[in-house]
Amino acid sequence: MEPAGHESPRDTAAELRVDRLRFLQLAGAGAAIPTLAGFLAACGDSSSEGGGTAGGFDGSKILYLGLEGEDGKSEATAFRKRHDLRLQSTYVASANDIFAKLKAGQVYDLALLPNPYVQRMIEADLIQPLDLSQIPNQQDLYPNLRKPEWGSKGGDLYVIPIAWGDGPFVYNPKNVTTVPKSAGDILGPSWNKRYVLFDDPAVPFMLFGRLLGFDPPHLTFDQLDQVSAKASQLVKGAVAFANGYEDATDLIARGEADLSFSGAEFMLNLGKEKGLTLDYAFFEESHGGGFADGLAVPKSAKNLAGAHAYINEMISPKVNAAISTTLSTAVTNEKARPLLAPDLAKLYSYEAVESPDSDLKFEDWVAPSNPPEGIASQADWLEAWQKVKAG
Amino acid sequence: MPHGPKLLTALGLAPISIYYALLFVGSIGIFLAYSFYRFEDFDFVPAFQLGNYGDVLGSELYQTLILRTLLLALAVSVVVVTVSYTFVYLINFVFARHRALLYFLVLVSLFSGYLVRIYAWRTLLGAQGVVNEALLTIGLIDRPLRFLLNGWFAVGVALVNFMIPLAVLPLHAAMANVSPKTLEAARDLGAGPVTIFRQVLLPLTRGGIVVAFAFVFIASAADVVTPTLLGGVQAQMVGTAVQAQFGTTFDWPFGAALSFTLMAVVLAVVATFGWTMKAATR
């Protein structure tokens, strides 16, 4: 049971209004007695739980598409039980797969989108504007996350951030005595065959683009060639392409590598599970490397009421804090932070999402799909990356 | 043939035919059509144009990846067919009494999951793996051999391991039809081991060899998981490029063209192998 008081009074009022409406509709359909029982149960539910939004979705199914761990599978169990909701999740390895599945016309009620993908999803007409009247907890998000530019278009908001973080590299301090400062340091002979990469051009191209003084992800073809040359050196010196954060941690734990070029703070927890102490730091070119993951409602969604209510629940203080604890990411709801364990609450600088002058930017680290003439597209980046890998 | 048996035959073939027509031929047909489409603004524009194939064939990158993939698949196929053929021969003609047990030992590896076996190879070949630890312990090396994992060696070794059961089955089916008395008769007529192999055993088992080669070659050329997890940064094959086109750039028409180009080259190699075997054993 969730304790009352974590939700705003607005939530309770909204639920009561809608439940009354629902009661009248169902009573009119001649289902007075069972509906009255359901209504009373729902009223009791809302008063004791203090949360939830519109009804009309009880007993339904939510089809989630996204990364594992960000669907509230264990964190939102109580909410689903209260509303007899079934969660059917389709997990993917990367955000690109989300795009591909939605583009193929598959039906989902919720899609988990990292910040660089939101605008391209809007452009491709794959997600729809959110009805914020059904997501009252949105008002409690940190200011920089409430209506971020990367998640909006034409005054509409398309995504609600549920987690955010930065972009460190992770290393084994037992074997790394001199922590690299720049991404360029990794290209030196002392790092040869000591690090793992992810099979994705985004991070190396961004970092080397900045190292060379360019403005990624908007690279000209000549700049892309120069960045690719650096990336070739990087790939040649790597041990392997890790198949995700867990695999990267596993490779470090097995002694195959000392550093993961792309990382996340929660790898420290994964390392602990393997009896390994890891640490993290940032390349100076990364500028903190901010990311935010948010929930959006695809155009193909059938259960709109359920999707909106579920998003609202995912950013409720208790659930948001639980997700943060699971993933070691930062919370998006201001009221969730006091619920975090002290270590986790201190792990991120929340000034980044409170202050408009924050250094950490949720940048677009994926090349544009339809760039202006002379600028390399995402397809060009991928082809360049394939060439880099082919040697 | 009377109508009754014909009808029964048709009914018997219907489920598998419908299954393959819908799920295999149908989906392949859809992707073949996609390979002629154009990709514009995230949309697949229906068209009949060969631009995607031209881009694949004209690209040095994809030529390199396809050639590299074919060479690895060829090397794996030759090793697997040779090892499996020898193994099946020994089981059938030398250790015939223990045939059931020996076949079971080969096929038991199919009971474990593909990914489990890949991770098992990581454990064996890694810097702190069983092989390196053993070599370090007995003093043969003073630092771990890094080439064992994350490169072509690991991909080759793992693929050979995965493919042997696939090759053993058709080779066993072919060799089971060769009577030991046939080989004995050849020996009685004065044929030496090489002649018996070339003029008796090879022609009688040719079908099994071609099928085993085809199984192994096609499966190795199409593999994505093994090079991804064991190949490190060196062992890049064309499968990962196809995957990237479908997943990362969403350019399904180009990905489909790349797949069909690979499929055509692989089928050409298999057909060439079949004709060569036929000519060599005529």
Image (cartoon, coloured by chain):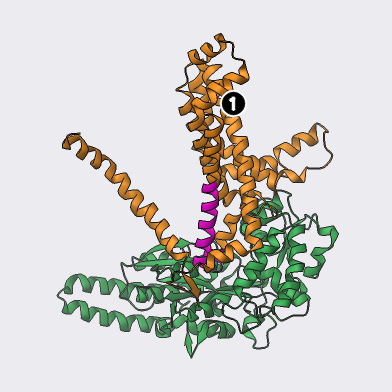
Q: Residues within 10 Å of mark 1 (few under 14, many from 20)?
A: some
Which quadrant holds residue A82? bottom left
Query: Is the residue B90 above or below the residue A34 in the image?
Result: above
In the displayed image of the protein, which residue is found farthest to the top? B188
Q: Residue at x 61, y 74 (%)?
A: A366
Question: Is-magenta flag for residue A193?
Answer: no
Q: Is residue B98 above or below residue B134?
A: above
Q: Which residues are magenta?
A: B245-268
Give the color of chain A as drawn: green
Secondary structure type for disc 1:
helix
Disc 1 chain ID: B
Residue B109 in view, yes or no:
no
Horizontal relation, residue B145 to residue A41: left or right: right
Quadrant in the picture for the N terminus of chain B: top left
Q: Main secondary structure of the magenta part?
A: helix
Residue under the point 41% across and 65% down: A78
Residue A385 in the image: state x and y as whole percent: 66, 66
Closest to the observer: B198 or A51? Answer: B198
Residue A180 point in image, percent of width and height: 81, 66
Please name whichever residue, B11 or A250, is drawn nearer the observer in this view of the structure: B11
Residue to which mark 1 is pinned:
B86
Which residue sits furthest left?
A30
Q: Is residue B252 magenta?
A: yes
Please tell me in which quadrant of the rendered image residue A189 appears.
bottom right
In the shown orientation, is residue A312 left or right of residue A117? left
Residue B141 pos. (x, y %): 82, 37
Q: Is residue A116 in view from this perspective?
A: yes
Amino acid type, mark 1:
Thr
What percent of the width, then of the height, locates residue B133? 75, 37
Instruction: Name, please, the residue furthest toward the bottom.
Output: A155
Chain represented in orange: B
The residue lying at 51 percent from left, 17 percent from top is: B96
